[in-house]
Amino acid sequence: MASLLQNLLGNENDFKINDQVLANDALMALKGASVAYLGATLESATPEVRRMYNEYLTQCVMAHEGMTALAMKKGWYKPYLAPEEQITETFKQSEWVLNANT
Amino acid sequence: MSRITTGEMLQLRELLQMETNSVAKAKATLNLIQDEELLTLAKSGVQASEARIKGLQKFISDNDMVKAEVH
């Protein structure tokens, strides 16, 4: 019964994914899609196929640009920080995810 | 239009699978987003991805690559 109540109300210690993780994941997904469409464009021979992939590649690059701008504005992604500080921040995040309750 | 190569068909399948998986994941994570601006961007991303899927589906059915009708 206690666990049912806990499920309904949510536990303070429950693991919650945050916007920073979601934004980083979106950036990685868009990067992956861009790489995939670039590869597909270069490897295709049929003009119609190349044109379609090229258009989708542009869409993905532009979406990535928009997401990068937002992530930087919100402080979720800090590419201009010193490399040592960037790796420290990511290291802390990796500890957080390992210590999170599931 | 010209015939499509075997490699192109395999790649087309891979890309459609990638877009399908990513839009499914994006839809599932939409209700976890707290930030309003991120939510707006994520929603437009889902729409763009859905449009790409429709484009891929159209290309596949226009070129008679599937036996069954694509809805």
Image (cartoon, coloured by chain):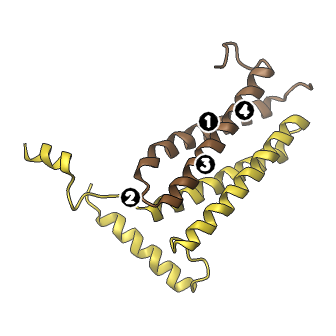
Chain A painted colour: yellow
Quick check: B62 left or right of A3? Answer: right
Task: Say if labels 2 and 1 share a chain.
Answer: no
Which comes sooner in the sequence, label 4 or label 1? 1
Identify the residue shown where x is 68% and y is 37%.
B51
Tag 4 and tag 1 share a subunit: yes
Q: Position of residue B60 (x, y in %)?
A: 75, 25
The secondary element bearing badge 2 is classed as loop
Q: Are marks 2 and 1 in contact (CB under 8 Å)?
A: no
Q: Nearer the viewer, residue B40 or B11?
A: B40
Please, which chain is the residue tagged with disc 4 on? B
Q: Chain of mark 2?
A: A
| Subunit that carries the residue with mark 1 | B
Q: Amino acid at mark 1?
A: Gln
Q: What residue would you read off at disc 4?
A: B56
Q: Looking at the image, which is closer to me, A49 or B6?
A: A49
**Closest to the observer: A40 or A63?**
A63
CA–CA distance in space, label 2 to label 4: 32 Å
Q: Which mark is residue B17?
A: 1
Horizontal side of B63 relative to A96 (left or right) equals: right
The residue wearing badge 2 is: A17
Residue receiving disc 3: B44
- Badge 1 density bin: few <14, some 14–19, many ≥20, Cα 10 Å: few
As measured in the structure, the alpha-carbon distance from the residue carrying label 3 to the one carrying label 2 is 21 Å
